[in-house]
Amino acid sequence: MSVMSSPVEFLELLAREAAAVEFEGPLVAARAAGLPADRIAELERAKTVALRVRALLERRRRRESELSGLYDTVSDLAGLRDLDDVLRAIVHRARHLLGADVAYMTLNDAERGDTYMRVTDGSVSARFQQLRLPMGAGLGGLVAQSGAPYVTANYPQDERFHHTREIDAGVGEEGLVAILGVPLRLGSTSIGVLYAANRSARPFAREEVALLLSLAAHAAVAIDTARLLAETQAALAELSAANTTIRAHSSSVERAAAAHDRMTALVLRGGGVEDVTAAVTDVLGGSLLALDAEGRRLARVGEIDEPDRTDIVEAVAASRTEGRSVRRGALWYAAVVAGAENLGALVLHPEDELADADQRILERAALVTALLLLFRRTVAEAEGRVRGELLDDLIARPLRDTDALRSRARRLGVDLDAPHVLVAVGEDAIAATGSARQRVLSWATTYASARGGLAAARDGRVALMLPGQDAGGSARAVSRDLARITGRPVTAGASGPSTGPASLATAFREADRCLTALGALGRAGQGASTVELGFVGLLLGTVDGGGDADVRRFLTSTLGPVIEYDARRGTALVRTLEAYFGVGGSLARAAEQLHVHVNTVTQRLERVGQLLGADWQRPERALEVQLALRLHRLRTAEV
């Protein structure tokens, strides 16, 4: 027997890790050499032992590879944090370790009661990748339901499983034949299934089942770890958000406390609405507008446009109804109310979104504003009463203790020895209701006080004592401004200037007579002084009961035909008479003033004589004509 046909050759084959088919070589050579049967039997035994050794070494190498693969898998999974990365790594490793065509994983859906395809590796079918398996259906559904591994060498023909059209269609489209599925278990709970599959029929060895089970066990732990990590991260995020919310709330509470303290201090030290608006914007930022009940601006901080009146009314009504601030677009409105009385509104344009605590700051500011407005009103009413009582005493007769009156005036900031004008406001400014009467008096008190003067109600009229020397200008200003408040024309008569307490009563009577004269002259709704009306005003002011009817009768009887003639013919007889009397009866100077020829003046005067009678130039008659001309001019004058 040659060396090549000895059992040693099998050792050499083992040493070089020859393929199994090569172990037939020594037997073929021995038979060809004609070795005896006992030697061939010995070689057969040697071959069998060598193949067993080769198989053992192969299993050990394979086991070593599997253990190395498992170790690498555990290392990979330990470094992953994202759940999707964990699942993809598990499926890819399963396909690699088992040398399968496809590996995939399904996870159980507790809400729907089935198991669904979560991750695939090596799959080419979209339908297969979207499969959902009812519990107990197909191989995967059975594994998910039972929690035990299942394997089949030829799934389409295996009758052990409950086949469904959807599952079989997906498996068929993927081309899978041999399938191995093992459960993913956490303790006694199955959370899904891990699969390895081939597109050809072949059985899976027990070692492969054990390997996939080991991988599934690691995978389940990794999945749970990733889930716990995700839950922990979510919990930390929630805690962080909660902490942020708590800090923001704490900051809001601190701002609210600071604003409360600041506004309380404002009230205690007698601050105004301007101080409140400044405090709110310091705390909340943005711009703030304070409005009164009529929508007029009380104070403004920052650049903010005044909203439309309709928007203000609607928003304030909503704020009063809801009992809190309301948002309209970019603006926040807080009604300023005292009981059922509307005092105004605060309109805020914030830089940032307002938290609940910030809204409370705005609402607290509205409450403080209401308190300040009520306090200001109370003080104004009290001061108005004091000022009114002083003026009433000054214009009353007889005048008592002028030194005491001077002392009272000084405490109110009024110097009675400085020039003052007296203004009397007519009854046309005061409606029948007491509220309107009070409103006019309140306005007059504020108007006079702001100018260092006094105001009071007197005999159904309102009297104002104002510093200055322009009686007519003061009367017109009062008439104009009060008309805006009342919405109707206001007549105001004035006199003065007057200096010293003793002269004020006389000045008021003159202002009152001027007021009466304006009515008699048909100039209601205007303002003028006794100086501007001249002797006619004084004369009319002393007439008792005649009024406008007497003036009209006098004008009609004295100058009526001339006035009517001018109106009908478009002539200038009245103007010619005024010019004639104005130059002392000189025809030439009258013609020069009228820019006409002397003959024209003569002709016009002749026409006057025809209308009034030939005696119109007699002294007593001429005086009446001149008085009528003066009355006519005052009645038609525009002030």
Image (cartoon, grey):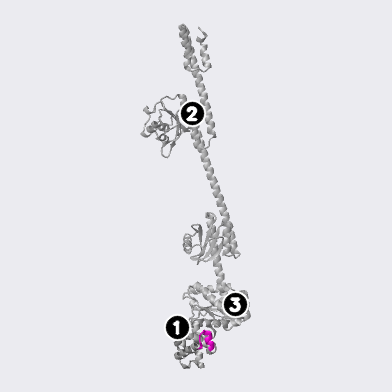
Task: For marks 1 and 3, give the one nearer the viewer.
Answer: 1
Q: Could you say whether the residue bearing mark 1 is in a helix, strand or loop?
A: loop
The residue stretch that appears in magenta: 588-598
Q: Could you say whether the residue bearing mark 3 is in a helix, strand or loop?
A: loop
**Amino acid type shown at disc 3:** Gly
- Answer few, some or many: residues within 10 Å of disc 3's Cα (few below 14, many 20 plus, some between 14 and 19): some
- Answer few, some or many: residues within 10 Å of disc 1's Cα (few below 14, many 20 plus, some between 14 and 19): few
Dominant SS of magenta comes to: helix
User: Sequence order check: which comes first, mark 2 or mark 1?
Assistant: 2
**42 vs 631: above or below:** above
**Amino acid type shown at disc 1:** Gly
Q: Which mark is residue 96?
A: 2
Cα–Cα gap, marks 1 and 3: 44 Å
Judge from the rendering whether residue 594 lies leftward or rightward of residue 140; answer left or right: right
Q: Does the segment drawn in magenta span residue 527?
A: no
Marks 2 and 1 in Cβ contact (< 8 Å): no
Is residue 194 visible to the viewer in this orientation of the structure? no
Q: Which mark is residue 570?
A: 1
Cα–Cα gap, marks 2 and 1: 121 Å
Residue under numbered circle 3: 468
Residue 321 x, y percent position in the rendering: 46, 61
**Amino acid type shown at disc 2:** His
Q: Could you say whether the residue bearing mark 2 is in a helix, strand or loop?
A: helix
**498 vs 288: above or below:** below
Q: Name the residue located 53 percent from the left edge and 88 percent from the top edge.
A: 588
Front residue of this view, candidates 216 and 35 = 35
Task: For marks 2 and 1, give the one nearer the viewer.
Answer: 1
User: Sequence order check: which comes first, mark 3 or mark 2?
Assistant: 2
